[in-house]
Image (spheres, rainbow, N blue to C red):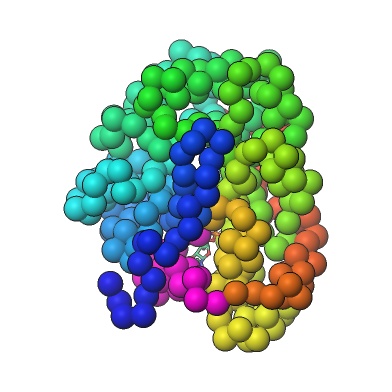
Amino acid sequence: MMQGQPDAGTVPAISLNDGHAIPQLGFGVFQIEPRDTVEATTRALEIGYRHIDTAEMYGNEQEVGRAVARSGLDRSEVFVTSKLNNGFHRPDDARTAFDETLRRLAFDYVDLFLIHWPLPTLYDGDFVSTWQTLIEFHRDGRARSIGVSNFQPHHLDRLLAETEVAPAVNQIEVHPFLTQEPLREFNRTHGIATEAWSPIARGKVVDDPVIIGVAGEVGRTPAQVVLRWHLQRGDVVFPKSVQRARVEENFALFDFTLDDSQMDRLSGLNRNERTGPDPDTFAFIPG
Ligand SMILES: NC(=O)c1ccc[n+]([C@@H]2O[C@H](COP(=O)([O-])OP(=O)(O)OC[C@H]3O[C@@H](n4cnc5c(N)ncnc54)[C@H](OP(=O)(O)O)[C@@H]3O)[C@@H](O)[C@H]2O)c1
């Protein structure tokens, strides 16, 4: 570990509604090529990250599993999330896909398994039977926690009304240009933790003058103040980078704070601007 760098114990844990806990800061591996993923994940684990966010869709589960296995860390020390890909929502397909996820990771459980997208215009609008299948994985212990991603309140309402298990998390796009107050409030009201994907808006935050101003006030980088803003709001984040210096920068968030005015100025940048698809219309099934 580099001098002056926080260790893994510095990262707060967020309690989930099923009794498990998740490290509030992790490392995302979306758009990391499989051939680069062992190295990138290994670097993140060396720096101190103990939470990795992957998905079947990212094509790099095997490499994440390999990095965890080679790290010398006990499996129980690393929180690993994966997600059900869009083509596998029917219950039998979901069962096969989950078996494959565990096989590729070479794990006997994942810490968290999510429905990646609700796909309300596909599968006759039925994401409830998919959720019931994830409940099976939770009950048999192979998914310690289960949750959803990109679910809107009206999607969550159906899961809450029609099944016995509420999602532990809802992983949604959140950053200062898309602050998602109503959806985060809905999650909070129902005991669902919010995970913020694309937390630095895929790098766009670094050019914003207000963010640059706040960064100057606290002597940090724009990415750091935005990640700190997420942590102080109580959300879980897992920024992605393939560059060591940035992976270190994105982990060094625990020796400064933003005051209320700085938090409000970042929140005031909201313009409901997505970098990714709209969950109500997204209907993509990878070929
Ligand atoms: N559930 C979903 O539907 C969904 C969708 C999207 C993402 N996610 C998850 O969320 C994670 C993070 O989201 P994301 O990868 O889309 O976006 P992000 O973390 O907001 O941004 C990543 C981009 O910012 C750059 N970057 C990273 N750190 C930086 C820094 N300190 N300063 C300047 N630029 C920096 C990276 O480039 P370099 O790599 O070149 O440094 C990369 O281009 C993903 O990896 C994935 O795990 C989930």
User: Could you tell me which residue is drawn at 32 percent across and 59 percent down?
Assistant: 45
Q: Nearer the viewer, residue 233 or 248?
A: 233
Report whether residue 282 is seen: no
Q: Is residue 281 above or below residue 277?
A: above
Location of residue 112 in the rendering, given as x and y in whole percent from the top left corner = 45, 37
User: Could you tell me which residue is drawn at 38 percent across and 25 percent down?
Assistant: 141
The total of numbered circles placed on residues is: 0
In the rendered view, does 164 fall on the left or right side of 1?
A: right
Q: Is residue 246 above or below residue 177?
A: below
Q: Nearer the viewer, residue 123 or 197?
A: 197
Location of residue 265 in the rendering, given as x and y in whole percent from the top left corner = 76, 72
Location of residue 217 in the rendering, given as x and y in whole percent from the top left corner = 65, 86
Looking at the rendering, which quadrant does residue 160 occupy?
Answer: top right
Looking at the rendering, which quadrant does residue 164 occupy?
Answer: top right
Location of residue 176 in the rendering, given as x and y in whole percent from the top left corner = 70, 63
Q: Is residue 240 magenta?
A: yes
Q: Is residue 132 magenta?
A: no
User: Which is the main secondary structure of the residues drawn in magenta?
Assistant: loop
Q: Is residue 23 above or below residue 59?
A: below
The image quadrant where one finds the N terminus is bottom left
In the rendered view, does 70 fall on the left or right side of 98?
A: left
Residue furthest out toward the top: 92
Q: Nearer the viewer, residue 233 or 71?
A: 233
Q: Is residue 114 above or below residue 160?
A: below
Q: Which residues are magenta?
A: 238-256
Q: Nearer the viewer, residue 35 or 202?
A: 202
